Amino acid sequence: MPRIPVVENIMQANQVLAAELRQRLDAAGVVGLNLMASPGAGKTSFIIGTVNRLQHKARMGYVDGDIETTLDAERIAELGLPVVQINTGGSCHLDANMLGPALNELPLDELDLMLVENVGNLICPANFELGTHLNVLIASVPEGDDKPYKYPPMYRGVDVLILNKIDLLPYIPFKVDYFLRGVEILNPQLTTFQVSALHGDGMDEWANWLAAQLL
């Protein structure tokens, strides 16, 4: 019986398109970030904190991936960035086919950094390359310290890990050493920052590191 490898073909087609998008970003001199997290990890607040710290150092654009709403995009637009909304209509991730039209709507030649806020999910976004230069995972203390053990593909496929909401560590039984040990097993080369986007702890260190990647 013939079998059609639909999933394999979809992944391969996405990788080809993602490579083309990377070339477009490279040609424009834009560094692209793919920011991923579970719902409620504080992604948008983290992005706002990042934009506030880099707005005098870099020209930024923003792409928001959301199932239905424009709530996050509206918050970022208030900061004065060019913003493009992608509503996936139920899909649990962004892919290169979705991001391509968004690049057409951004003034790439006028940007240094493009922030892509992926759909809140710890499974699907890890499987689809976007053509961005850095994959950033935002974990948070309230999610629990066992997430690297329960969602290993997400932790394997990222370049930077942000542990957010560290201001809650005194109130939640989160073992930082246990969490980081799980991360180290999966991704020993990972760059990690511990931050509180709400209160600003660790955000300057992260922003300075990111600014250095733009040079």
Image: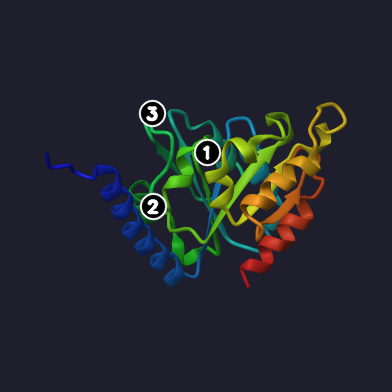
Q: Position of residue 66 (x, y in %)?
A: 46, 34
Residue found at the very far left of the displayed protein? 1
Q: Residues within 10 Å of mark 2 (few under 14, many from 20)?
A: few
Q: Nearer the viewer, residue 127 or 196?
A: 127
Q: Which kind of residue does numbered mark 2 sit on?
A: Glu
Please report contact status of discs 3 and 2: CB closer than 8 Å, yes or no.
no
Total numbered labels placed on residues in the image:
3
> Front-most of 135 and 81?
135
Measuring 64% from the left and 41% from the top, which residue is drawn there?
148
Residue bearing mark 1: 73
Residue 21 coordinates in the image, percent (x, y): 38, 61
**Three-letter amino acid code at disc 3?**
Gly
Q: Quadrant of the N terminus?
A: top left
Q: Which residue is mark 3?
A: 90
Q: Amino acid at mark 1?
A: Ala
Badge 1 or badge 2: first in the primary sequence: 1
Q: Which residue is mark 2?
A: 105
User: Which badge, 3 or 1, comes first in the chain's sequence?
Assistant: 1
Residue 64 in view in this figure: yes
Q: Is residue 148 left or right of residue 31?
A: right
Give the vertical position of 154 relative to 18 (above or below).
Answer: above
Q: Residue at x 38, y 58 (%)?
A: 18
